[in-house]
Image (cartoon, helix red, strand yellow):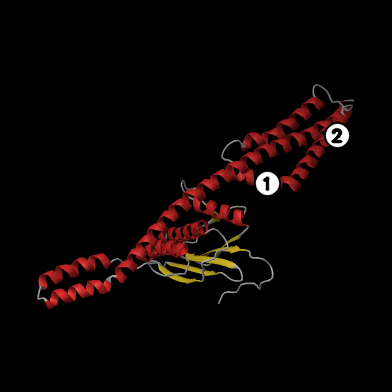
Amino acid sequence: MSGSNDDLIFLNALFRAFLFSVIIFIFHRSLNEPYHFLAANMEKGWGIIAAVPILFFVLVMFLGLFPHTRSDNLPAVVFLYIILGIVYFIIYQVFSNTFFLLCQQRDNEILKSQVRALSAQAQTMKRSQEQIKIYRHDMRHYLKNISALIQAEKYQEALDFTGKTESQISQPAEPYFCVNPTINAVLSLYLTQAQEEGICVKTNCDIPLSLPADAAELSTVFANAIENACNACRKLPENKMKIISVRCISSPQFILEISNTFDGNIEFDRSHRPETNREGHGIGTRSLAAFAEKYHAILDYKTDGDMFFFRLLINRPPGNEKAVWK
């Protein structure tokens, strides 16, 4: 009799375990990716959510096997597992929607703050460039004044005037990388800084005035990607060659490629994007992802030996041939 009761307990436990496995399989097939996304991005609370199906399973097993085995409640057990699926799906919907809104708000704040900073920098450089044009335009007047002072044998005044003029026009002209003033200002700022740090910079940029995205937001992409490349180069030893290459074509598709040397240590998340656990880092990568989502662009990260590659493709209307690097 005892052996029969033990067999009944085993069969009931096996049946409940089978139903539980079916539920887990369904969730794995239909909700595996979004749940992994939440698990990877939630700092706290995921353990509590994961405990829900486990505790539910323990409850069902307890009700079915204690104080003695019950075989007359199998429909109720099946109903309980259906409820488990519904409850857990509702929990997922609540957390998924909340997390999506929080991520969207965070990414918008990142983009807005960086766009404001870069726009201010672009305006500053634009004003500086306009001032240089004014100085060059007035150069002929300065030369006439100096010539007049020399002819009047007022040499000291001529020297003083020359020194004053030189200080006014000695500001270096902004480096030229492309015809788009906003993108050119960003490239000037970051690439000049990279060169001053001893990084070898290579550029080949075809970036017109008309862009496939907002100029300020696209300049943020350039700024973040180049800044990430500079940070990677800074980690290399002093005797190691440091290289940053920026290439861009605008037709028939807008493609940006930024490559740089790195130390070989990098981790990718489930979306194959670089990730870091260092506090204050990773904002640039999230900003790039937010831009790509907004403009339905394609981001690609890969490594090849000691080189790291970042690529961005902004799709244009169909009908054009695929862009090819020259």
* Crowding at mark 1 (Cα within 10 Å: few <14, some 14-19, many 20+): few
Describe the element under mark 1 as helix, strand or loop.
helix
Counting the numbered discs, the total is 2
Amino acid type for the residue under numbered disc 2: Leu
Q: Amino acid at mark 1?
A: Pro
Q: Position of residue 77 (x, y in %)?
A: 83, 31
Looking at the image, residue 259 sits to the left or right of residue 32; the answer is left
Residue under the image location 12 percent in, 69 percent down: 157
Give the CA distance from mark 2 to mark 1: 34 Å
Residue beneath the point at 56% across and 43% down: 105
From the viewer's perspective, tell me whether residue 54 is left or right of residue 46: right
To which residue does mark 1 refer?
34
> Of circles 2 and 1, which is in front?
1
Give the mark nearer the N terminus: 2 vs 1. 2
Residue found at x 61% / y 59%:
297
Q: Are the residues tagged 2 and 1 within 8 Å (C-beta)?
A: no
Instruction: Give the position of the C terminus as an image quadrant.
Output: bottom right
Q: Nearer the viewer, residue 284 or 27?
A: 284
Mark 2 highlights which residue?
Answer: 11
Q: Tell me if I can see residue 272 in this picture.
A: no
Q: Position of residue 265 (x, y in %)?
A: 50, 58
Q: Position of residue 133 (x, y in %)?
A: 34, 68
Above/below status of 74 relative to 288: above
- Residue 183: % across, % down: 47, 63
Q: Which mark is residue 74?
A: none
Q: Secondary structure at mark 2?
A: helix
Q: Image check: 38 left or right of 157?
A: right
- Of residues 70 and 321, the one nearer the viewer is 321
* Along the line of sight, the residue nearer the viewer: 286 or 182: 182
